[in-house]
Image: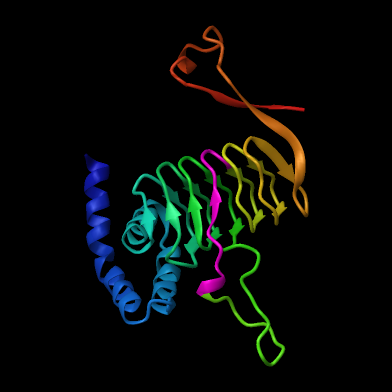
Amino acid sequence: MLKGLVNILALVLVLPAAATCWLESVLSPDAEGVFVFWTQCVAVLPGHPGMYVRRAFYRLTLESSSLKCFIGFGALFAHRTAQVEDDVYIGPYTVIGSIRLRKGCLIGTRANLLSGSMQHVVGPDGGWQPGDPPYLAGIEIGQHAWIGEAALIMATVGEASVVSAGAVVSAPVAAGVVVAGNPARFVRRVRLETPPAETNPDERGRESFVSFIH
C-alpha cells in the first residue's frame, strides 16, 4: 500500500513535465528535444526517491512502461518509442534507444542499447547525418535475458540469453545462449532445469533456474 501511494505521488509530481512532452509530440511528432531535456533532469535525481520519479516519468511518456521495474541513477531513454515490461532491471548510467525490454530482463551498468545498427545515412554533402526517426530499428531484449556491464547492443537478444560484460552485439542473438566478445560470438548454451526439491526448501516454489552447460 505504501509503495502504491509513493507511485501515485511520483506520478503527480512528474505530470507537468510529462504534459510538456505530450504537447511536443502533438505539435511535432518527430521532435524529442523536450523529452530529452526531462530525461536528463530525472536521470540525476539521487537515491530511491529518484528511482520512483524516473519510473513515473517514463510511465507517462514512453510508448509503454511498467511501474514494476527499476531504473538506476544516470540511466536515460533516448526515444519515446521504448517499451518497458514488468520486473525489468535497468542499471545505472544505461542508455536505451528505441528498444522493447521484455519481462524480467536485466540490463547491467553502463550498457548501451542502440536503436539498431543503421541509424545514420550519408547526406547530399557526403557527410554523415545524425539519427532520424525513420531509421530507428525497434530491437528487443527477450524475457529474462541478462545484458552484462558496458555491453553494446545493436540487435535483438533472445529470451533467457546472456550477453557478457563489454560484448558488442551487432547481429541477433538466439534464445538461451551465452555470447561474448567483439563482435559477440556464441560461447555456450543456457539450460532451464527444475531445481531438486531436497536441495533447498526455500527454492521449491520456483519453476526453474538457469544453469550453464559447455
Question: 70 or 182: which is nearer to us?
Answer: 182
Quadrant (top left/top right/bottom left/bottom right) for the C terminus: top right
Q: Is residue 124 above or below residue 55?
A: below
Q: Is residue 161 above or below residue 197?
A: below
Q: Residue furthest top?
A: 198
Residue 136 within the segment the image draws in magenta = yes
Q: Looking at the image, which residue is at 66% across and 50% down? A: 172
Residue 7 within the segment the image draws in magenta = no
Residue 108 in the image: state x and y as whole percent: 58, 49
Relative horizontal placement of residue 34, taking residue 132 as reference (left or right): left
Quadrant of residue 112 within the rendered picture? bottom right
Residue 33 in the image: state x and y as whole percent: 43, 79
Relative horizontal placement of residue 42, taking residue 158 as reference (left or right): left
Residue 44 visible, this angle: no
Residue 47 in the image: state x and y as whole percent: 41, 54
Question: 134 or 155: which is nearer to us?
Answer: 134
Residue 201 in the image: state x and y as whole percent: 47, 11
Residue 39 visible, this angle: yes
Q: Looking at the image, which residue is at 61% across and 71% down? A: 119
Q: Looking at the image, which residue is at 34% across and 78% down? A: 24
Q: Looking at the image, which residue is at 70% across and 38% down? A: 178
Number of marks? 0
Quadrant (top left/top right/bottom left/bottom right) for the N terminus: top left
Quadrant of residue 153 within the rendered picture? bottom right
Say how the picture is coloured: rainbow
Q: Is residue 66 above or below residue 96?
A: above
Question: 174 or 162: which is nearer to us?
Answer: 174
Question: 159 or 203: which is nearer to us?
Answer: 159
Quadrant of residue 86 within the rendered picture? top left
State which region is magenta. 133-145
